[in-house]
Image (tube, rainbow, N blue to C red):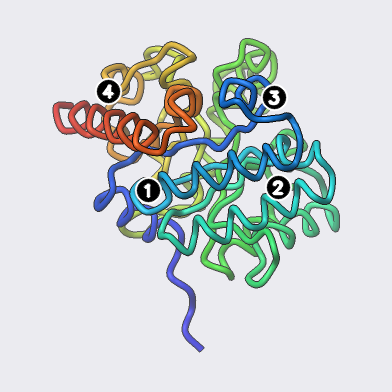
Amino acid sequence: MSSPEPFGARLRRAMDERGALCVGIDPHASLLADWGLNDDVAGLERFSRTVVEALADRVAVLKPQSAFFERFGSRGVAVLEKSVEEARAAGALVVMDAKRGDIGSTMAAYAEAFLSKGAPLFSDALTVSPYLGYGSLKPAVDLARRSGAGLFVLALTSNPEGREVQHAVRAEDGGGRNVGATVLAHLAAENAGEAPMGSFGAVVGATLGDLSSYDLEINGPLLAPGIGAQGATPADLPGVFGAAVRHVVPNVSRGVLRHGPDVTALRASAEGFAAEIGAAVAAS
């Protein structure tokens, strides 16, 4: 039995064919209201189905935020399952934004929920938190390798609260490398020797400014939230990520979703962001 094609290879091909844009599926209550939908399961289903219909056949990545589905209980999770299935069937890669992180058998169970072939929520990749120690992610790393899936590990996030952990300097490094840099180093080791790109990526905020003091060359993808409503623009990407910009997957959520529920407007917005991102990377 042949091994599944790794996520990194599939993502690189999708980025080359469709552009690097990742669009979030974030059905929070205010956005449902803006679309004229009720804050209930019916509104959730209509919202998610519209985004998938509009974008899954043309963007590289869709990223549902699990929390906005989970808040409706089992019926909301059922909508999430259907959205993942339909998005993948239409050709988009699905990154489940669930930010799971735990130890031992619990981490293994989270991995099985999202990274096990045949699981109702099986996704192409999962966001995870390394802040119980990078080694706590081993069950997810191992299962991702077996199933051809990937991980995006929180490394340098754009929220101000993240600095107290991610910028803390490890005593073991003799006053040198901070926690965020340590996470990046672990990911570089995971991706060593992989071509055209490894499957283990980092979450690095596009709003953080010059990151030249960090080694972002991890031979893996960099999921970059912050484009659009949070203030960063596609033109900012080369200045933030330097040479690693070719592996950046910029995430836009509200910047695209605010144009719904009109399918044509959603598509036009996504295509505009994708074109701007492509031009910025090409010019770097």
- Determine which quarter of the picture holds residue 114: bottom right
3D distance between C-alphas at marks 4 and 1: 20 Å
Proximity of marks 2 and 3: CB atoms separated by less than 8 Å: no
User: Which one is nearer the viewer's eye here, 247 or 91?
Assistant: 91
Tell me where residue 195 appears, x and y as whole percent.
33, 59
Quadrant assignment for the C terminus: top left
Residue located beneath label 2 in the image: 135
Q: Kindly identify which residue carries mark 1.
A: 60
Q: How packed is label 2: few (under 14 Cα within 10 Å), some, or many (20 or more)?
A: few
Q: Secondary structure at mark 4?
A: helix
Specify the amino acid type for callout 3: Ala
Q: Which residue is mark 4?
A: 238
User: In the rendered image, which quarter is residue 239 located in?
Assistant: top left
Question: Amino acid type of disc 4?
Answer: Pro
Tell me which corner region of the image, top left, top right, bottom left or bottom right, holds residue 144: bottom right
In the rendered image, the vertical position of residue 36 relative to residue 64, given as above or below: above
User: Can residue 45 be seen from the camera position used here?
Assistant: yes
> Dot 3: within a 10 Å radius of its alpha carbon, few (fewer than 14), some, or many (20 or more) residues?
some
Residue of label 3: 29
In the rendered structure, which disc, 1 or 2, sits on the residue that comes first in sequence?
A: 1
Q: Is 180 in front, or is 66? A: 66
Choose between 40 and 197: the one closer to the eye: 40
The first of marks 4 and 3 along the sequence is 3
SS category of the residue bearing label 1: loop
